[in-house]
Image (cartoon, rainbow, N blue to C red):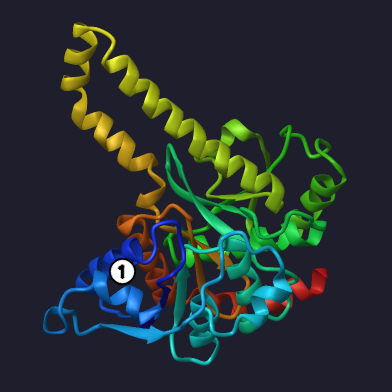
Amino acid sequence: MIIAVDAMGGDYAPQSVVEGALRSAGALPVEIALVGRPQEIEPHLPPARQRPDNLRIVPANDVIPMETGSTRSVLRRRESSMFVAVDMVANGQAQAVVSAGNSGALVALSHSRLGVIEGFRRPGIAAPILTLKGSGVMLDAGANVDCQPIDLAQFGLMGSVYVQHALKIDNPRVGLLNIGAEPSKGNNLTRAAYDLLAQMPINFIGNIEAPDIFNGDAQVVVADGFVGNVALKMTEAVAQFVMEELRRCSRSSLASRVGAFLLREGLAELHERYDYATYGGALLLGVRGISVVSHGRSDAKAIANAIAVACHAVEGGVVPHLQATCSSLVESLS
């Protein structure tokens, strides 16, 4: 298995990306292709004789800036590290691509170069979420801000297949994020999507509200990309706020410092569980290949975990399962 990693993507690239790739090369049975400017990658690698045999550099001399917004301009930058990495998957030279660069650019390139699985209208980002009962995903987490009801129904189907085969959760429960539990609640989009989701061959449990995201009743949370992205970023912000408040309170008095010392292992575990770096990246579902969107602020730990996400998705046969089980079903609802 070969994973193409965009070495130039992210706020701390290429150093954090190279360090994360080195971690993965020593821990996973994969070959890692670091795609980018060799002269900028080399200084962060050990001497050639000390490098892992399963890590190599693929030259690419251009970089897509984080602020690039035009799909047309992204598609023209054929020498960019992200374009070359995605094209490796499109041409069969790699089985997955990982990038912490411009997420909109990665979605556009994956859509264009890999293509969408027959029967699906649009790909969606399946962002990992942590619940009281284990792991799950929220879909879509930002790839599509304007959706039709059929898109939400297809996101539910995509997410169900992914959770079943990559996360190994049998018959995952699928919930539609809404402002109330009753089928009549919501706007025109969610009311129509509810009816379509109910027709899908999935374990659809109906509407869920924002607090229900974390209680674990649904392993797949369906939303349009606008709502999903806002919810995800709010979750990250609240987790960071709580941890900062705990740190501040733990220093406010002697008793607080003693209490914090006694709770230090539990607090460290809490931070680990809610740190985005622990989950690494989000899979772009619906394209004909494995494409993992990583956080722009990804450090080495996050990159290593994103590579693991890609590896598990390939091993789980996510794309073949989507192609085999979903195409005819979603076509009948289009």
Residue 120 lies left or right of residue 14; in this view the side is right
Residue 224 appears in view: yes
Residue 53 versus residue 99 in the image, above or below: below
Which residue does the image show at 17% across and 79% down from the upper left? Answer: 51
Which residue does the image show at 38% across and 43% down from the upper left? Answer: 275
Q: Quadrant of the N terminus?
A: bottom left
Residue 4 versus residue 141 in the image, above or below: below
Residue 209 lies left or right of residue 189; in this view the side is left
Which residue does the image show at 73% across and 75% down from the upper left? Answer: 72
Camera-side residue of 254 and 7: 7
Label 1 is placed on what type of residue?
Val
* Horizontal and vertical percent position of residue 26: 19, 72
Q: Tell me the residue that label 1 is attached to.
A: 18
Camera-side residue of 182 and 247: 247
Q: Quadrant of residue 19?
A: bottom left
Q: Quadrant of residue 261?
A: top left
* Horizontal and vertical percent position of residue 217: 54, 40
The kind of secondary structure element at disc 1 is helix
